[in-house]
Image (cartoon, rainbow, N blue to C red):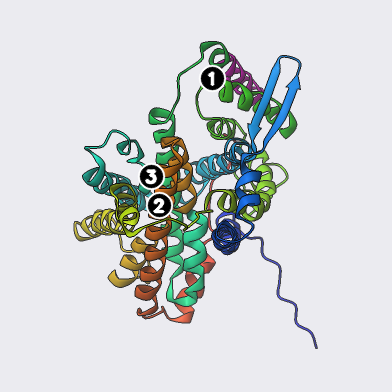
Amino acid sequence: MTHHRPNRPLSALRDFLAHEASGGYVLMVAAALALVVANSPLAGAYFGTLKLELGGHLGPIHLRETVLHWINDGLMALFFLLVGLEIKREVLDGQLSRPSQIVLPAVAAFGGVVVPALIFLGFNIADPATRAGWAIPSATDIAFALGVLALMGSRAPTSLKIFLTAIAIIDDLAAIIIIALFYTAELHLVPLAAAGGLLLALLALNRFKVRALWPYLIVGLALWYCVLESGIHATLAGVALAMFIPLRRSPGRPDAHDSPLHRLEHALHKPVAFVVVPLFGFANAGLSFAGITMAAVIAPLPLGVALGLFLGKQLGVFFTALALIKLKLADMPRDAGWKQLYGVSLLCGIGFTMSLFIGNLAFTDPLLIDETKIGVLAGSILSALVGMAVLASGRPPAPERQAEDEARLPDRDGAGES
């Protein structure tokens, strides 16, 4: 006799966790493959393809960029669109909408942004050529970190997965603000004004309660081009577009047909997690070890990045969380102890995708970009390995408590549209 388990709609957060963890595994493989290819007889073809220029003219529109720039400025706009959608959903209708639950990850995330930047500047403050990379170790790679955390199984309580997700989302928001404020090139006023007009058009669509997605996406495509031409990094157009996609709160239905934001987020998850981010990782993680000396590895730039990620993240996240919990301003995540909280703080030092992205914005010198890759890879791998070792030494929660926690994930309330 066959028993069928009743179907239960997954919450947006459960869907998010599942997809991002799986995408993290693909990202790990893509990064490893990039390193192998960059140090093989295929290295010439690999680097040559990334420098190949593609594009053309369409009336007054002129777009011709290298393959690497199409990935970093074009495809990654979809990644930032998804990040923006997730931030909006979590703030209005998710784990970040409840003040009691946002305090711990928000303050811990702040510590995890500031301390790595200070450590980086400690090594690079005297060098104008490298100190522009101060924000490189400040962001957590959500796909990579959740992929590693998922490997720990029951050793990582569900509450810690939620905690890590919230920190990474707040980290992404901080990174978006940092990119907009500190990594913007010379501004061009005409396309910037056009981008402003397109934002007003998105606002009008929002206010008139247009629920079809295609008008938003068409305006968003034009917005991407105007932002690209304005001097502001083009990927920020994805975040701006996300802020105007209507949200119909729909507990437990991440692909609800009556919620444009849920529909778009659900449609983007797999392409971004399994195509866009791994392709970005493959294109940007390629580092040739030929000619790399120990002096290059311990130079101020890679050392500042690696220690910013490994030491700065764990110190910033763990000790701010410890202070809040000891002062009774926040509660310890359910079923977690200090060792498990410390382990997750270590995993916050996995900064792969956003760190490489900011590194490409901070530097144009290929040597500095390679040094950034050395630091990001070293800091992220060390954070992952030590974090896994700490979590593996902890005691998993009782199965019934773990199941109880997982059952709580879909329980989100509220209704309405934003």
| Residue picked out by circle 3 | 136
At numbered mark 3, what does the secondary structure look like: helix, strand or loop? helix
Instruction: Name the dominant secondary structure of the magenta segment.
Output: helix
Q: Position of residue 124 (x, y in %)?
A: 26, 42
Amino acid at circle 1? Ser
Nearest to the observer: residue 209 or residue 77? 77
Q: Is residue 348 visible?
A: no
- Residue at screen point 51% across, 22% down: 231
Q: Position of residue 17 (x, y in %)?
A: 55, 60
| Residue picked out by circle 1 | 230
Within the magenta stretch, is there residue 201?
yes
3 vs 2, front mark: 3
Residue 305 is marked as none
Local crowd size for mark 2, using a 10 Å CA cut-off: few (<14), some (14–19), many (≥20):
many
Question: For the residues marked 3 and 2, what is the alpha-carbon distance in whole angstroms?
Answer: 17 Å
Specify the segment rendered in magenta: 194-210
Amino acid at circle 3? Ile
| Residue picked out by circle 2 | 167
Question: For the residues marked 3 and 1, what is the alpha-carbon distance in whole angstroms?
Answer: 23 Å
